[in-house]
Amino acid sequence: QVQLVESGGGSVQAGGSLRLSCAASGPTRYCMGWFRQAPGKERDWVASFSILGNTYYADSVKGRFTISQDNAKNTLYLQMNSLKPEDTAMYYCAARGTYCSVTYRELGRYNYWGRGTQVTVSS
């Protein structure tokens, strides 16, 4: 059973930065991702990192966010720069036991989820 624990959320002003962490344990995670959910909205895909080292980003965060993984620490990161008020959301780490393939955006393809960490960006 994969377990995921997020940390690093907080409150920042627009233009600021945060780094989210997701500590993972359990079986091999072939594809990991970050999703976010604002109040009253659906959970949206943000970025994914494949076991092959490929990275994928939603257009809304491309150029501002960077997903990375430290294999030695079994930790997934999301470096968020140039934050905007519209980035405000609960951020969730997710993992799956299959390759990212072309389905890395699909929420339903991820088997394991963390409890989330809140990010609030004020204008």
Image (cartoon, rainbow, N blue to C red):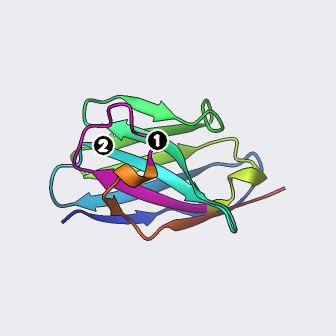
- Secondary structure category for the residue under label 2: strand
Q: Position of residue 115 (x, y in %)?
A: 43, 71
Seen in the picture, residue 7 relative to 19 is either above or below; the reply is below
Q: Position of residue 82 (x, y in %)?
A: 70, 41
Quarter of the rendering containing residue 80: top right
- Classify the position of the C terminus by image quarter: bottom right
Q: For the view shown, which residue lies furthest in the left direction?
A: 27
Q: Which mark is residue 105?
A: 1
In-front residue for pair 113/16: 113
Instruction: Give amino acid for label 1.
Output: Arg
Q: Which mark is residue 52?
A: none
Residue at (48, 47) in percent of width and height: 78
In-front residue for pair 9/61: 61
Q: Is residue 93 left or right of residue 99?
A: right
Q: Local crowd at mark 2 within 10 Å, few (<14), some, or many (≥20)?
A: many
Q: Is residue 119 left or right of residue 67?
A: right
Seen in the picture, residue 14 relative to 38 is either above or below; the reply is above
- Residue linked to disc 2: 31
Seen in the picture, residue 92 relative to 73 is either above or below; the reply is below
Q: For the view shown, which residue lies furthest in the front direction?
A: 108
Q: Position of residue 29 (x, y in %)?
A: 23, 48
CA–CA distance between discs 2 and 1?
11 Å
Is residue 7 one of those drawn in magenta? no
Residue at (56, 56) in percent of width and height: 36
Quarter of the rendering containing residue 90: bottom right
Q: Position of residue 12 (x, y in %)?
A: 71, 59
Is residue 94 one of those drawn in magenta? yes
In-front residue for pair 27/77: 27
Nearer to us of marks 2 and 1 is 1
- Classify the position of the N terminus by image quarter: bottom left
